[in-house]
Image (cartoon, helix red, strand yellow):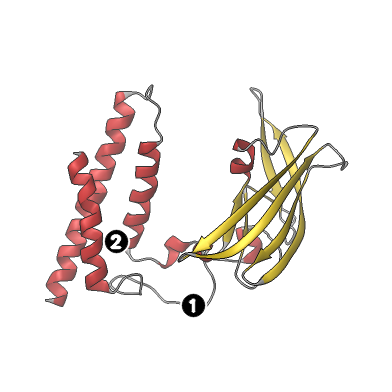
Amino acid sequence: MIDKIDGIWHLRRIFRLICGGDMGGYGSGRRSNRPTTDDCLRINLSTLKQLGMLQRHCMTRREQIWGQYGQTIAQLTLVTDVHCLQPSPRLTITGHAFGKAINCVVELDEYALPYGGERWYALCPRTGSRCTALVLPPGQTHFASVKGWNVAYGSQRECPIHRAHRAIDKAQTRLRGLSKCTRTMTRERLLDWLIERQVFVEEQIDKLAQMVF
């Protein structure tokens, strides 16, 4: 079963040869110049929490670097202040991204969960609404929500095979991160889903091959 999943990478190489990589091809829809989330820098509140940057009465600083094709496209400093020096929680982002200077402040909001703990949100500077992720499109100088910047999700412009590849990547990442204590049924269900996606990719590539050759 694992060997069959590994075969996906071979199928991807075949698909790129047939379709010319990430260019619009079979099944692709209308293109536009509007950036997608794949083009943006992204900061997830859940990631900040995992890194210990959302602890009460603490100020935390972290450097973050984004790269693309071996080149650094952004180098930012993230500073969180959770009821430490500021009266309300906030995230300060400074540095450079896409060749522009970045200096923005995003207010944070804490929501207490019924059974203990809390969930953190950012208040979008453009809409004022709560969001769990902030994005920075190329050419802009401050972070906001996906809705605030009106950017499209990458999967919206992909053909079915590309969407399947994206879903497989997420599932494989989840599979690798499963704990040893994960139930066998859960692990098998995820493996079955991966095999189902692989079969779909095989069928679509067969159709493409018949159209091209």
Give neighbour class at mark 1: few <14, some 14-19, many 20+ (Cα, 10 Å): few
Residue situated in front as seen by the camera: 64 or 160:
64
The image shows residue 212 at horizontal and vertical percentages of: 16, 76
Q: Is residue 132 left or right of residue 107?
A: left
The image shows residue 117 at horizontal and vertical percentages of: 66, 27
* Cβ atoms at labels 1 and 2 below 8 Å apart: no
Q: Quadrant of the C terminus?
A: bottom left
Q: Which residue is mark 2?
A: 161
* Mark 1 element type: loop
Q: Residue at x 23, y 45 (%)?
A: 5
Q: Is residue 65 left or right of residue 81?
A: left
On screen, residue 160 above or below 92: below
Give neighbour class at mark 2: few <14, some 14-19, many 20+ (Cα, 10 Å): many
Q: Residue at x 61, y 63 (%)?
A: 74
* Mark 2 element type: helix
Tell me which amino acid carries mark 2: Ile
On screen, residue 88 above or below 35: above
Nearest to N terminus: mark 1 or mark 2: 1
Q: Residue at x 50, y 61 (%)?
A: 153
On screen, residue 188 above or below 70: above
The image shows residue 127 at horizontal and vertical percentages of: 72, 59
Tell me which amino acid carries mark 1: Ser
Q: CA distance from mark 1 to mark 2?
A: 20 Å
Number of marks: 2
Residue situated in front as seen by the camera: 132 or 53:
53
The image shows residue 32 at horizontal and vertical percentages of: 49, 77
Q: Quadrant of residue 75?
A: bottom right
Q: Quadrant of residue 124?
A: bottom right
Q: Quadrant of the N terminus?
A: top left
Q: Which mark is residue 22?
A: none
Q: Which mark is residue 32?
A: 1
